[in-house]
Image (cartoon, coloured by chain):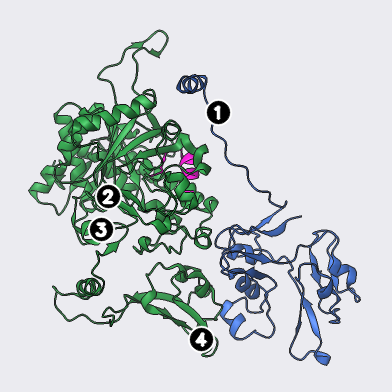
Amino acid sequence: MLDFTIPRYKVLRDPDLCIKCGVCERSCANEVHHVDMDLHRVVAQHERCVNCQRCVTMCPTGALAITNWPQVGNGTNNWTLQVMQDVEKQAQTGGVILSSMGNPKHYPIYWDHLLLNASQVTNPSIDPLREPMETRVFLGARPARIKVDERSHRVLSELPPHIRLDVPVMFSAMSFGSISLNAQKSLAIAARELGTYFNCGEGGLHSELEGYGSNAVVQVASGRFGVNTHYLQNSAMIEIKIGQGAKPGIGGHLPGEKINAEVSRTRMIPQGTDAISPAPHHDIYSIEDLRQLIFSLKEATLYTKPVAVKVAAVHNVAAIASGIARAGADVIVIDGFRGGTGAAPQRIRDSVGIPIELALAATDQRLRDEGIRNKVSLVVGGSIRSSVDIVRAIALGADACYIGSAALIALGCHQCQACAQGKCNWGIATQRADLTKRLNPKIGAERVVNLIEGWNHEIKEMMGGMGINAIDSLRGNRLMLRGVDLNEKELDILGVKYAGEQ
Amino acid sequence: MKRIYCLEDWCVNCRRCEVACKTAHSVSHDTVKAYLLEGQTAFSRIHVEGGAELSISVNCRHCDNPRCVEGCISGAMQKDPETGVVFCDQSRCVGCGTCVAMCPYGCVELHVLPGAPGKKGVAFKCDMCGDGKGSFGDPACVAACPSGALIYVDEEPKPEPEPLEEEATEEETAEKEVLA
């Protein structure tokens, strides 16, 4: 059948700069470049290019750039080239279109409509370089009141289990299988150095990461892969995954080809079999069922570890969160619709779920209204791009943030959205040995640590500007935010005033 | 002495080290000019062996007892007593090729320079250049390596032991016993 699709990208090679060294050819797992000795130049198979930009970065002379395929559209806003490509692809294959990473569509990004406050004249700002500034966060339930023996400075009441984060950021769940062991290792090393946590996802904890258990959030998802008593006990926190922002209501499917010996051992499934995570947990059909699982996990760990429940931001997320809090969870994780994924049906990724900013504001408000906000910590993820997004999220009511895509970008990810093909040129979303070794965890961890340390400095600067010296004082402090370019309804849900309002 | 080592676990066969070496040893110190104009005079002294699955970047070990120096008939090949760097004084090289034959690592090459009398080659080898584009003082190949496979360190690296779990407090140990 004649392939109607046209290439998405075009490789631009500056012939004046190309030295035909072949670095691009050896760098590309998609086999785009080829040094043709007959023609005595480097040729490109443009249709194979996914725009991962590995060759652009590696080229010693900067001779390369990737551009859109120069085909002009037909002028309609309805049948754009991209829309027609999707139709052509499906007409040819009859399949579901798979894609990866977060929702790329032009939905409003509310973070960019929220501006921060700063102190002027009537209240002093604080210089974080001269004065102590606290960005430490504890996650877990807070008792309504605590008894303290003031003579011995001891807390008498029994406290629920907590985890301590030195920075208000954790690395979100990315399983071994969806990302390489080197990528997980990079995050594990970085988490330990930063005093925070990485999340091993639902693929089990690889034996080489056992030593990082005290910095690991282990996930119990609908497939229950890799879950055993040791797995639960060798962790800092347990997370029950109900849903994921990129594909709410959808399960996971790691094809049998990717289940090699290592993945099979870690997931505790036979080699070569498909790893299917069902869409729902088959033992959870109600809040009461969820409560049973939460307490089974608490029982298995002797009530020493907080249990988190992760849900995707969907229409009635606030009510669901209220149920989760009442089911006994210590932490609620909400993943917004721009959150990433290794593979999801494109239509689901692009159209299901709601923005995290609105979900967060609605949930925080609902939990406060019901008087149960202290029973849970709130962690949000899915589209946290920078330190200022974290500050905005915390001001909207979050306790801490999860970052996934940003951490991967620090490791080299260029958001080409081709993770599902398993040929990641940056050694992240692949299990091919020749590609995974491109990501040296030492370098990876250093880059991630640099990123978060940079962010932490910025968070302190912003807090200092507001005259706040501890991140706890910023939490839910929506007066520190003002909206621009938002309508009444949006301001109402976000709980912020319009810029200029007193 | 500080030497360049290649960790094969991380060598990704991109061969940027070769490009960087050639550039560093060109007159122009410009990659494009080194390749397009100085092809006859600028040579890379480092070579990647192997393919995509397993590769290693091989260059001079700057041996304690260098065989190339031992075999040199003209005194061109020398080991600097202070720095330990083995280098070739090309003005004295007669192109006999003994060093090439004696080097156990294949890290010396003869190249005929244009206009050389009798078309005899001269020996080219790693001279431990410094101050590459990366961290201060790194040789060009080390600075160009994208995955940390080439390192410039004092001692030959040994495989790293796995990280140990942080020491458990008494309470945690007691908990673990109870759990067991």
Instruction: Decide if residue B37 is on the left or right side of residue A390.
Output: right
State which region is magenta: A186-201
Q: Amino acid at mark 1?
A: Glu
What residue is shown with label 2?
A: A251
Mark whose residue sits in front, 4 or 2: 2
Q: Which mark is residue A41?
A: 4
Q: Amino acid at mark 3?
A: Asn
Task: Look at the numbered disc 4 and give the secondary structure of its residue.
Answer: strand
Mark whose residue sits in front, 3 or 2: 2
Q: Which chain is green?
A: A
Q: Which chain is blue?
A: B
Task: Look at the numbered disc 1 and give the secondary structure of its residue.
Answer: loop
Task: Look at the numbered disc 2 and give the secondary structure of its residue.
Answer: loop
Neighbours of disc 4 within 10 Å: few (<14), some (14-19), many (20+): some
Q: Indicate which disc, 4 or 3, sits on the residue closer to the N terminus.
A: 4
Instruction: Decide if residue A276 is on the left or right side of residue B91.
Output: left
Q: Indicate which disc, 3 or 2, sits on the residue closer to the N terminus.
A: 3
Of A452 and A417, the residue lying toward us: A417
